[in-house]
Amino acid sequence: MNTNLLNEAEAEQLQQLIAESKHIVICAHKSPDGDAMGASLAWKSYLNQIGKTDVIVCMPDAFPDFLQWLPGANTVLRYDKNPERVQEAFDKADLVCCMDFNQYMRVDAMQPTLVGCKAKRILIDHHLEPETNNDITVSRPNMSSTSEMVFYIISQLGGYEDMSKVCAQCIYCGMMTDTGGFTYNSTRPEIYFVIGQLLSKGIDKDSIYNRVYHNYSVNALRLRGHIIANKMQVVNELHAAYFTVTREDMRRFHFIKGDLEGVVNIPQQIKGLKLSISLREDTEKLNLVLVSLRSGNGFHCQPMAVEFFNGGGHADASGGKLHCSIEEAEQITLKAILAFQDELKKK
Ligand code: 5GP
Ligand code: MN
């Protein structure tokens, strides 16, 4: 199977950039998910493997608790906690690798540090409409995940033979989480070829699944129950559902970061549902509502995220934010659903 992702010139350029670099920073988007973390740590593992000893992963903020087990997660530098150390790493870097995000603003408060950095820059990502002001931009929106891309790139650069189990675990985690355990964005046969290759590195895929998905605290599971039972609104005739999560809801169930990960997917279990929207009050900033959208059954939520929620993302998994109260956010959501009613109504 030819899984080369880069053309010859790109592969050569990438190899040369890496060869010329001594101090490397890897970064990914705010609220790093399994793919952002998996791709970053797998890439770090590869760079270490080929002899790059100074490779620092810098994230804008915290990653969820269920990713703590990822090999190397404890070495990640957080901008929100250690802005000076992150700045220092960028200042020293001769190469910055941007993983799993398309727009520089996706690194949030770390953006000035990233765009002000003099180092060479490569971007490896699978979102639509990437920023292209980089020395190398590898954008493949048809890929399941950035982690899948990292697998192909490592292989193309000749690193598969020596790939460690640790690296394979990180890649598998990213591919698994960005496809909801291979339930969406995962119909390309190559994905299963890659999984085979990762398994032959000795990864235990069931254990990775358990570590990521069977990791709820009692409170976190009860919070989900509360959202489904008491908060979810369903507009039956438009095949749409939405819910709000307030700071009060979070306080009641002792919310910690990560507890609501993936909760927007739950309403999609309703037969025929096309659109699910989660509206969550920010835990710190007042009048900031974090929005997640998921779609299926022939509807695509990305245009709605752009038009109504100051966001974007993938065709069927998008996000955004609103600067208003949760009540106003609910009104905007109803407006958005109505604006797309013709598409949503269809059986
Ligand atoms: P989530 O709902 O998991 O937070 O986000 C789903 C997807 O939507 C992410 O993978 C990302 O591509 C996209 N996304 C989330 N927030 C934003 C945003 O504020 N702006 C844009 N352009 N995309 C976002
Ligand atoms: Mn991703």
Image (tube, rainbow, N blue to C red):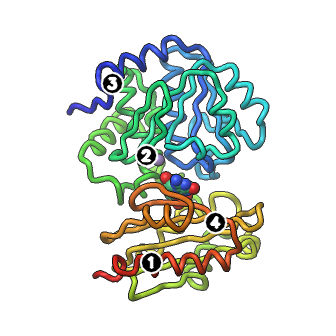
Residue tagged 3: 156
Q: Is residue 274 above or below residue 238?
A: above
Q: Which mark is residue 52?
A: none
Looking at the picture, how far across and down is residue 105, in whole percent? Answer: 60, 45
Asked if residue 204 can be seen in this view, the reply is no
SS at mark 2 in the image: loop
SS at mark 1 in the image: helix
Q: Residue at 43% of width from left, 46% of height from top?
A: 129
Do tag 3 and tag 4 residues touch (Cβ < 8 Å)?
no
In the displayed structure, does residue 238 sit left or right of residue 65?
left
Q: Which mark is residue 322?
A: 4
Q: Check disc 4 and give the amino acid type.
A: Leu
Q: Check disc 3 and give the amino acid type.
A: Gln
SS at mark 4 in the image: strand
SS at mark 3 in the image: helix
Q: Check disc 1 and give the amino acid type.
A: Ala
Return the residue nearer the eye: 166 or 33: 33
In the displayed structure, does residue 1 sit left or right of residue 210?
left
Give the spatial CA distance, label 1 vs label 3.
46 Å
Earlier-in-chain disc, 4 versus 2: 2
Earlier-in-chain disc, 4 versus 1: 4
Earlier-in-chain disc, 3 versus 4: 3
Residue tagged 2: 129
Q: Residue furthest left?
A: 1
Residue tagged 1: 339
**Mark 3 crowdedness (10 Å alpha carbons): few <14, some 14-19, many ≥20:** some
Q: Residue at 43% of width from left, 35% of height from top?
A: 168
Do tag 4 and tag 2 residues touch (Cβ < 8 Å)?
no
Asked if residue 188 can be seen in this view, the reply is yes
Give the spatial CA distance, label 3 vs label 2.
24 Å
